Amino acid sequence: MLNSEFNITFCRGICYNGPSEFYFFYTIMQPIAQTMRKQVFVLKYVKEHPWHIIEDGYHPEDNRLFESLMSLGNGHMGHRGNFEEDYSGDSLQGSYAAGVYYPDKTRVGWWKNGYPEYFAKVLNGTNVIGIHVEIDGETVDLGKTEPINFTRILNMKNGCLDRTFTYKTNNKTFDFKIKRFVSYDNVEIGAISYEIKSHDKAIIKFMPYLDGNVHNEDANYDEFFWENCSSSCDKSVAGISMKTKKTGFTVNASMKSKLVLSNNAGDTPEVFATPTEITQEDKYVEHVFESEVLPGTSITLHKFFSLVTDRDHLLENLETYCNNQVDYAFSEGFVTLFAAHAGKWADIWKEADIEISGDVGAQQGIRFNIFHMKQTYNGEDPRLNIGPKGFTGEKYGGSTYWDTEAYCLPFYLSTSHAEIPRNLLVYRHNHLEKAIENAAKLGLKGALYPMVTMNGEECHNEWEITFEEIHRNAAIAYGIFNYIRYTGDSDYLAEYGLDVLLNISRFWADRVNYNPYKDCYMMLGVTGPNEYENNVNNNWYTNLMASWTLEYTLESLKYVQESDPSRAEAILSKYDFKSEELSEWEVIIKKIYLPEIEELDVFAQQDGYMDKEQILVSELDPSNLPLNQKWSWDKILRSCFIKQADVLQGIFFLSERYDLDTKRRNFDFYEPRTVHESSLSPCVYSIIAGEIGYHDKAYELYQRSARLDLDNYNNDTDDGLHITSMAGTWMSVVYGFGGFSTTEGKPKFSPFLPKNWNALNFHMLFRDRLLVVHINNNEVKIQLESGEALTIEIYGKDYSLSTSAPVISKIRN
Amino acid sequence: MLNSEFNITFCRGICYNGPSEFYFFYTIMQPIAQTMRKQVFVLKYVKEHPWHIIEDGYHPEDNRLFESLMSLGNGHMGHRGNFEEDYSGDSLQGSYAAGVYYPDKTRVGWWKNGYPEYFAKVLNGTNVIGIHVEIDGETVDLGKTEPINFTRILNMKNGCLDRTFTYKTNNKTFDFKIKRFVSYDNVEIGAISYEIKSHDKAIIKFMPYLDGNVHNEDANYDEFFWENCSSSCDKSVAGISMKTKKTGFTVNASMKSKLVLSNNAGDTPEVFATPTEITQEDKYVEHVFESEVLPGTSITLHKFFSLVTDRDHLLENLETYCNNQVDYAFSEGFVTLFAAHAGKWADIWKEADIEISGDVGAQQGIRFNIFHMKQTYNGEDPRLNIGPKGFTGEKYGGSTYWDTEAYCLPFYLSTSHAEIPRNLLVYRHNHLEKAIENAAKLGLKGALYPMVTMNGEECHNEWEITFEEIHRNAAIAYGIFNYIRYTGDSDYLAEYGLDVLLNISRFWADRVNYNPYKDCYMMLGVTGPNEYENNVNNNWYTNLMASWTLEYTLESLKYVQESDPSRAEAILSKYDFKSEELSEWEVIIKKIYLPEIEELDVFAQQDGYMDKEQILVSELDPSNLPLNQKWSWDKILRSCFIKQADVLQGIFFLSERYDLDTKRRNFDFYEPRTVHESSLSPCVYSIIAGEIGYHDKAYELYQRSARLDLDNYNNDTDDGLHITSMAGTWMSVVYGFGGFSTTEGKPKFSPFLPKNWNALNFHMLFRDRLLVVHINNNEVKIQLESGEALTIEIYGKDYSLSTSAPVISKIRN
């Protein structure tokens, strides 16, 4: 019995093992679920629809799951899809402000020197969406009185959460219709329209409130993370100000509401902008609006709220500013505000949409991923990054993993204007000094970026990850390379990139050790992307990417020395780089040890990989899967089974170095040994499978991540969504099916269309141009929607593309 | 600042990494401390004395340390050296009953499949030694009123804790003299004599009590571990009964006291056996004795207590039995009880004493170790084992580590009659089914004994130790071999040993994997005794001991098949051993892979050892030491530095397999790379150093552990003593300086005398004989004190030894 208890705990996150272990995909469950979804609807949580996420009917047992799926966010703030009114059923209340965190004291079983003292946790903050509702003096609570014809719908087209249901109490009937959004147009405000249409005469009371009595379920020591809570309240505006302990962030929330009474004759509605009563406590403020409703009339509360922090504004102005924001929202009104918000979403979709024809579930899945990526990060603030759960939950904390550079950056490169991915890079630049401290803490030179971080300091505390999964450092260097390759913004090097590259390279040069017996440089004691092996020697991927970093750094240095010599000199001097050190890097590049399995002519994942018993996943009894749930950690570590792309990750990153035969040999060797128990695995394999002509395999692998959260394959969506992995799914479509790549300012495509689909269209931004790629069973058509003409490549052939005419090529499937 | 806070936490035990990480010896501090101890006394806590541990003067700042050093125990119960009267200063109250534990819920940062759910914690139980003392209505509290001429002395000769001091209050003067012991003669009782001699007229009140309001400082979640507490109290006897949560052990304590008033004329003292008042609460009982004292007279409270558990007696009789025990103690009286107790200690010393002439500090140190080993484990109960802190503290929990077989067993073999070490082995036999479950939990066949345990279940929770430090299994097999080799009790195999051996061997055979490329059996993913490398492949020691286990198991099976064929058959059948499985073992034994460093002709600690940068400890700036405090865990793991004997441990265990040259080559290679940051390291190196003629080195290494706790080198003695490591020190003397070994019933000696000593004498039991070995600068003299004549070997030459005359040989130094 207790074992199963622990397994549940395991699933729900105590065991979180790093960004790529967000979920271990149910290799068995997933195809079954896929089938059932099409056939009997038993495992399907969400109704299929191209633009909507629909909870059809009332499912209190899955409320947390739907709350996660229907989270709203705008890059500045966000909430889980909680009900506005009181709810006594199971719920995870979540209201988050980007960049506001608390350094929760580390909890470990056994301390190791070098562990960080704190783990930055995302903070659950003031509840801004709450409205107590009473009918004839009785509180509306769907946990106590079950609603009829309940639907909860996340509209991804316009970023709105809609809820409708019928509620019967004391033989009276009421139709509820609730809309909520957090504005993408003015990210500090949000609004709720809460309408009740009455079939009977009744007294309805709305009590919109702000509540600072909140806690984090995921706190390590059950602490309350806030202090200095104060409130203000008059008959117009009410506010709560709270300050985080230790970090001292002040977050202010304000609200202002009005009541709209419409009769059934279509007359101009009566509007009450002043509450009848107010309540004010330290951490709680409330306005009371009350009115009688007659049969057939409706009563609507419009609640406007603002949430602002002293990260963005001077503390002394914060309260005034916050009240001004809510005043502005109030005066604009719900409809106008919403129109501005929806307009922003229309702009986003214009540049980032992917249309799939012939598979509504796939269409819904890919839009769901794009929608949540855009909700999580709007790219305006280089102090922010892409949290593992965005605004959808509080688990894991931290906000930045190597996922950002390795998986998310390509998404933002292609769906946003260049300053947005650039801000992701500047974030790391701004943390350079912390990364240097982090390396020093381990006794190493240069910069080691953290495994998990909020403000640049390491948060993670498992030695085999924190100290050893250092390949993350290379992803940060690769991000710079990738950004410049895509955007052509080489000036980034002089401004921000070079100092980061130099210090990462210095770390690598210190971390390798020369082996005089074998005359090569080795890297001992690392964990590669495959976290199912820990503390191995000479992980091929890590060694490859380390030496690649050294090469790219030297190239970049040369570029800056030529383009901006005084800047180059200043950087070298600031960090005391001498020519001897740089010469040493040349030697390391030449003598880096990259293990191979000679008899098979494939790269060796690590020194001891072939000493392991070699079994294929297909040879395992399926009852062993997922390994992460069925096997002991000991057995997993000693097995040859691979959690996620490792050698293949290197081949994906440095794709142009390897010919198709090499890719195919390594794919053929590693894919059958890979269990893909990480969301970050199938997309990489899928892309390479597409490239080497394994189209069915590519589609099969794509399916493994496309509807992960929507179908709750990992059984943990109730904790929040797997935000960073969503970008991988996007890559599978654009880089995989679209066969996209780029060098020297030229976008290249080698598309194919999955058999089950009729057509695939995707939009992408490329160097101030908007491209639309149409793929169907006959042809590939690429249009330039806006921007200057350019050369593109399709299946290896160059074409000139201008806005005047699309380029069309026959499809090669 | 916070870093240093964490370092302190680290020292004090959060980071406890396994039995052998009890302390990381202050390589730098130790020689300094040794020097200072001789010269300026600054770092010396304890006054030197051959038989006493003396706190000379009042040292409240070191009170916890002295409480640890002066702990009393008798194998059944024990207490730290706490004061009986109230004490408002810093103190760790500790009162423990052997075998009574609580399964505290595991605390980890990141859960891994296979971790145990609980960690069995030693329980702090009812305070039985407490006596409130009031003088003229004012509580005696040395934390508030500093005593004069304070001494606290642990008398190791008779197992008694003595305390004397002068106490001045309200211009009155009192001389206190307190004696306490827990009986080695009747292990369920103890007694205190609390005498106050008054220089002035005063009213003195004694309130002996039992108090169940106790907690464990080391609880993972601050839980109270007891339930169902009840009390009984009348004017004769008072008692507390408490039951542990979850495990349901009931522990009863009773007390009975009398007051003795002596005048200064030497008249027969007045005795008051009945208290004037009583107090009874759920978890607390108290008797009040009060009397006026006149100048020059003394007043003495004799408190007798008993502590019994339902582990030993029927629950329904427990209270009666407990009261009967305390009645017995009361009626015998303090003096008689003490005489019986002291007599037992005299017997122990007769058989186990080691005398060192010329170095009082060394003499005190070795007796301190023997004394605490004997206090911790009396060998009468095969359900008990040797806890890491014995009865001296609550840290770490569990009671059994591989230390028992590898380090402690030799001590009990030579200082106790055979049934006592035999019980240590039976303990493991009784846990066989749990060990089989433990292996199954990791997905393996056979038996894997736990890293840390109380009742056979694994308690530890660090994957690299719990799942990987599996060499512990071999130590258990080796313990059986070692016991039979020493005692000649081959019948043990049929009765208890064979099933253990077979199941451990089955584990090894499943844990190795055949490598077809290299045609050998490998063992991947292990942690050897050197815990400064984790998750390595082919640790030489582990592979060696695994294949040795298979060999010894097959030999043992053959022995039982010949001596008791039906028993052999029954065991094979019970565990379903077929001949094919046993044949496979033969193949593994032949093809086990034992890595070597060919160019140096030494054994390789593990596959990747020579890929590491090779540096010697002597080449390190001393400011790097101890590594465990100065370096990050990452840096330690990647270094070539060795925490404790690893290859050398194998050479020590299977000594007869290796010639002196091989031993010397391996010692010469590994010792300069070993930092000895484990108490279990120097003794093994010291013994081998002695054997290969490095006598000064042997003595230097011996010094590293001899006074570990007495001089508090690890700065953590306040948590309790390092019990299991004490046996290693004993081995350094008997196996090292004494050069003792044995095969085929013949004790062998190749002694040498450390330069600083004048003489070394040790007693040892061997197959119902008592030997005394005298070593001085001229000769070795071996006497047979009792038992039948036998053949012994000195420096490779056989001698007949009988009680009629000693054997004398010239010393070879």
Image: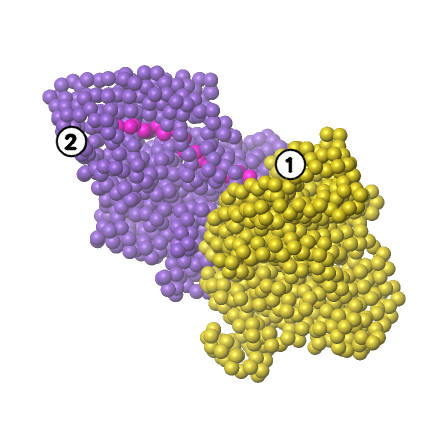
Chain colours: A purple, B yellow
Which x, y percent locates residue A148?
A: 19, 38
Q: For this rendering, which residue is in front, A669 or B105?
A: B105
Q: For this rendering, which residue is in front, A128 or A46?
A: A128
Depicted A181 relative to depicted B541: above or below: above
In what element is the residue under mark 1? loop
Amino acid type for the residue under numbered disc 1:
Ser
Which quadrant holds residue B540?
bottom right
Depicted A77 relative to depicted A797: above or below: above
Which is in the foreground here, disc 1 or disc 2?
1
Assign the C terminus of chain B to one quadrant of the image.
Answer: bottom right
Depicted B273 relative to depicted B540: above or below: above
Assign the N terminus of chain B to one quadrant of the image.
Answer: top right
Which quadrant holds residue B340?
bottom right
Amino acid type for the residue under numbered disc 2:
Lys
Left or right of residue B756: residue B170: left
The residue depicted at 25 percent of the width and 54 percent of the height is A35
Kindly tell me whether residue B586 is visible in this rendering: yes
Tell me the subunit letter for badge 1.
B
User: Cα distance, mark 1 to mark 2?
Assistant: 68 Å
Q: Main secondary structure of the magenta part?
A: loop
Which x, y percent locates residue B756?
A: 84, 57
**Stretch in magenta:** A113-133
Q: Is residue B38 magenta?
A: no
Residue picked out by circle 2: A172
Kindly tell me whether residue B795 is visible in this rendering: no
Q: For this rendering, which residue is in front, A498 or A33?
A: A33
Q: Is residue A120 magenta?
A: yes
Residue at far left of view: A265
In what element is the residue under mark 2? strand
Which x, y percent locates residue A488?
A: 44, 36
Q: Which mark is residue B88?
A: 1
